[in-house]
């Protein structure tokens, strides 16, 4: 028998309203996935069909999850103005928003068309909420917009390939504890874990990274346990602490050329993972190639 199954564990769901909230509209997505041939699956078409399904759910007083407005983002920009365009998958719902960081409600500004915000002087926080025709509200979503200044590049007199690497054979619970005299020092071609390392240790990769063009760069670290990445003295990615393999990201605006690169990592036992990736102007997310690292 071919088909699909979705389970809802209700041990901690004390009311039928809570169960409905967890099930809908996920059940609609499951039905679309199972009953629609792969060649006929289309996200835009599905969104249009949902509008009729939401009306049906309303008529039956189903306590479904209301989607928050789409369109808000987190991050930096080099522009002094940004355009905010919001949307919801409901034909008769309203969007209310604020631009001062306060919580939006039906008494806030109603969104009717895309609008422009000036962020030349200060960072702005936009919050928005969906309110359906039946009075249901979505979770509040937010976006933070900040005009970035390009960090000037360095002009080193001489560079060599790779990163200076310091290994500390000690036990840590935060990268902030890594200090003192290293157990060993060597040059790494890239950000990789050394072989034959102790069960518990800290690592520091230090050197330069050469970015090809001016622009906003997003850096990612995936680590088990903690890692923190600094570029030109600014903390860009904070992935510190005791945890399994997880990815964290951060942004910085960089002028083309060399910039200080400092990555700290520790392993407190068990599984161990460390990788660094980036994306930038006309550069898709990828592992940082070794030829970008110097010291």
Image (cartoon, rainbow, N blue to C red):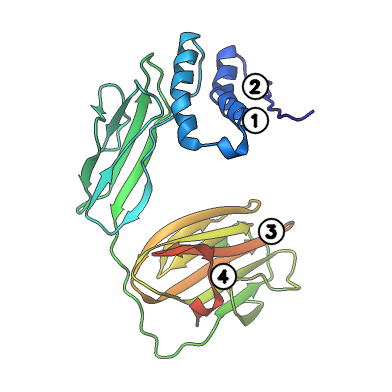
First-in-chain label (3 vs 1): 1
Give the CA separation, mark 2 to mark 3.
Answer: 33 Å
Picture layout, residue 105 above or below residue 55: below
First-in-chain label (4 vs 1): 1
Q: Nearer the viewer, mark 2 or mark 1?
A: 1
Give the CA separation, mark 2 to mark 4.
Answer: 45 Å
Give the structural element (helix, strand or loop) at label 1: helix
Q: Nearer the viewer, mark 4 or mark 3?
A: 3
Q: Does 33 sit left or right of 238 as displayed?
A: right
Picture layout, residue 263 above or below residue 126: below
Q: Does 169 sit left or right of 59 as displayed?
A: right
Q: Callout 2: 10 Å neighbours few (<14), some, many (20+)?
A: few
Residue 104: x and y, percent? 31, 28
Name the residue tied to disc 3.
Answer: 268
Q: Does 284 sit left or right of 85 as displayed?
A: right
Q: Nearer the viewer, mark 3 or mark 1?
A: 1
């Amino acid at each position: 028998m071919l088909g699909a199954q979705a389970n809802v564990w209700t041990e901690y769901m004390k009311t039928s309203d809570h169960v409905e909230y967890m099930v809908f509209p996920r059940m609609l997505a499951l039905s679309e996935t199972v009953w629609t041939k792969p060649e006929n699956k289309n996200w835009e078409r599905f969104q249009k069909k949902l509008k009729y399904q939401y009306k049906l759910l309303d008529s039956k007083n189903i306590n479904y999850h209301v989607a928050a407005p789409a369109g808000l983002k987190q991050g930096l920009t080099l522009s002094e103005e940004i355009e905010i365009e919001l949307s919801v998958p409901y034909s008769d719902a309203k969007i209310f928003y604020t631009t001062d960081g306060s919580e939006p409600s039906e008494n806030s500004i109603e969104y009717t068309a895309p609008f422009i915000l000036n962020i030349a002087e200060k960072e702005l926080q936009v919050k928005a909420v969906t309110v359906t025709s039946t009075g249901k509200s979505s979770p509040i979503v937010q976006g933070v917009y900040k005009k970035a200044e390009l960090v000037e590049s360095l002009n080193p007199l001489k560079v060599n390939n790779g990163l200076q690497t310091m290994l500390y054979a000690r036990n840590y619970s935060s990268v902030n504890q890594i200090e003192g005299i290293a157990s060993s020092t060597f040059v790494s071609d890239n950000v990789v874990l050394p072989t034959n390392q102790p069960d518990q240790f800290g690592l520091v990769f230090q050197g330069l990274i050469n970015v090809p063009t001016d622009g906003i760069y997003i850096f990612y670290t995936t680590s088990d346990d903690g890692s923190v990445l600094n570029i030109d003295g600014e903390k860009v990615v904070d992935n510190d602490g005791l945890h399994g393999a997880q990815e964290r990201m951060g942004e910085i605006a960089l002028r083309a050329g060399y910039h200080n690169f400092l990555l700290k990592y520790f392993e407190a036992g068990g599984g161990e993972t460390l990788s660094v990736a980036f994306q930038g102007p006309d550069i898709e997310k990828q592992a940082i190639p070794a030829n970008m690292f110097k010291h």
